[in-house]
Amino acid sequence: ITEYFLKRRQLISAFVLIDIRHDPQPIDLQFMEWLGENSIPFGIIFTKADKLKPNAINRQVEGYLKTMTDGAWEEAPVHFVTSSLKATGRDEILEYIGQINSDFFSHQG
């Protein structure tokens, strides 16, 4: 997968899917660090939010982002909380994709 990310010219942004029920996994953190080191823009999509209560969702997201900013990151990447079951976060992600595409194509002029 790293070759794809390094060689895909049309790549504007990637998304890393993270199950919100789990604490940060070293393999995910290492992959995101690799994306950053290679200047590949990305966002985090926390999935399965329907499996937790609102307070637990907030705790998990805050804890995850804190782990990142306590480590290699100065600031956390853009992130979304989603549930495919309830379509939570769908509109926000689509709006974000639309905005980054618009920004990209306006600079291609």
Image: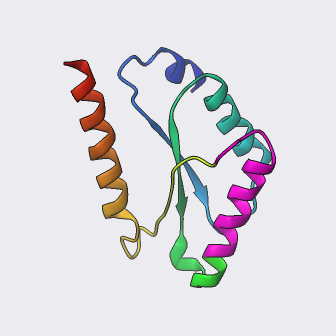
Q: Is residue 31 above or below residue 6?
A: below
Q: In x, y percent, where is residue 18?
A: 60, 55
Q: Is residue 12 above or below residue 27?
A: above
The residue depicted at 80 percent of the width and 50 percent of the height is 70
The residue depicted at 51 percent of the width and 39 percent of the height is 42
Side of 89 relative to 20 (left or right): left
Q: Is residue 65 magenta?
A: yes
The residue depicted at 70 percent of the width and 34 percent of the height is 33
Q: Quadrant of the N terminus?
A: top right
- Say how the picture is coloured: rainbow
Q: In x, y percent, where is residue 67?
A: 77, 54
Q: Which residues are magenta?
A: 58-75
Can residue 25 be spotted in the picture?
no
Q: Is residue 81 magenta?
A: no
Q: Is residue 33 above or below residue 50?
A: above
Front residue of this view, candidates 6 and 36: 36
Query: Taken as a whole, is the magenta stretch helix, strand or loop?
Result: helix
Can residue 98 be spotted in the picture?
yes
Q: Quadrant of the C terminus?
A: top left
Q: In x, y percent, where is residue 53?
A: 59, 85
Side of 83 relative to 108 (left or right): right
Hey, which quadrant is residue 9 in on the image? Answer: top left
Q: Is residue 9 above or below residue 76?
A: above
Q: In x, y percent, where is residue 43?
A: 51, 46
Side of 59 relative to 51 (left or right): right
Side of 2 relative to 31 (left or right): left
The residue depicted at 26 percent of the width and 45 percent of the height is 98
Hey, which quadrant is residue 2 in on the image? Answer: top right
Q: How many marks?
A: 0
